[in-house]
Each structure stands twice: as structure tokens, then as C-alpha cells.
Image (cartoon, rainbow, N blue to C red):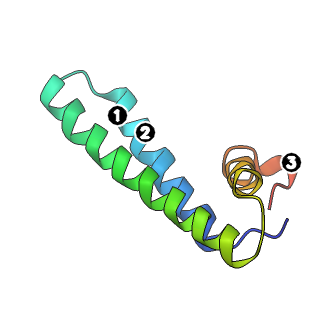
């Protein structure tokens, strides 16, 4: 599946927010970062859903392909 760079970029941003969250120990900072991660993830999911709808693709398969491309680029996921 040919995944657009825009979807990959959004998923990378969501994953980066998660990585920041995992490093924090202060509860207030964690809550603020959790919201940032949630928002980034929601934005990525919305874009994946819209792209899948526009291209008549299975949304779950598009999401899996995006995550594969981001998290395991050595396998040629995009």
C-alpha cells in the first residue's frame, strides 16, 4: 500500500509525544503530556480514517501500514 508522507508524519508525531510521556515522572507534567499525546494520536487517527475513506481502503489496514512504516521502516512498510 502506498502510504502518503502526511500520514506517516502524523503518526511519527504521535509516537514522539508518547515517548515524551514515558520519560516523565511528575504527575502534573505527565497529565499535560498525556493530553498532548492523545491529541496527536487523535489527529493521526482522523487523517487515517479520512484517507482510507477517500481511497476506499480498509481503515484498519491503512492504520497498520502507517504504523509499520513508522515503527519498522526497514521492512519497507510504505
Q: Earlier in the sequence, mark 3 or mark 1?
A: 1
Is disc 2 in contact with disc 1, using a CB cutoff of under 8 Å? yes
Residue at position x 74%, y 47% in the image: 68
Crowding around mark 1 (Cα neighbors within 10 Å: few <14, some 14 to 19, many 20+) is some
| Crowdedness near tag 2: few (<14), some (14–19) or many (≥20) residues, C-alpha within 10 Å | some
Q: Residue furthest left?
A: 28
Distance (Cα) linking label 3 and label 1: 27 Å
Q: Which residue is mark 3?
A: 75
**Is the residue 37 above or below the residue 42 in the image?**
above
Q: Secondary structure at mark 1?
A: helix
Q: Check disc 2 and report its element: helix, strand or loop.
A: helix
Residue at the (43%, 54%) spot, across then down: 42
Circle 1 sits on which residue?
A: 21
Q: Which residue is mark 2?
A: 18
Q: Secondary structure at mark 3?
A: helix
Residue positioned 51% across, 59% down in the render = 44
Q: Quadrant of the N terminus?
A: bottom right
Dot 2 or dot 3: first in sequence order is 2
Amino acid at each position: 500500500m502506498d502510504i502518503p508522507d502526511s500520514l506517516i508524519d502524523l503518526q511519527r508525531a504521535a509516537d514522539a509525544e508518547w515517548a515524551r510521556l514515558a520519560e516523565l515522572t511528575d504527575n502534573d507534567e505527565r497529565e499535560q503530556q498525556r493530553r498532548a499525546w492523545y491529541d496527536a494520536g487523535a489527529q493521526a487517527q482522523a487523517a487515517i480514517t479520512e484517507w482510507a475513506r477517500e481511497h476506499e481502503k480498509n481503515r484498519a489496514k491503512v492504520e497498520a501500514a502507517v504504523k509499520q512504516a513508522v515503527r519498522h521502516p526497514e521492512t519497507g512498510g510504505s
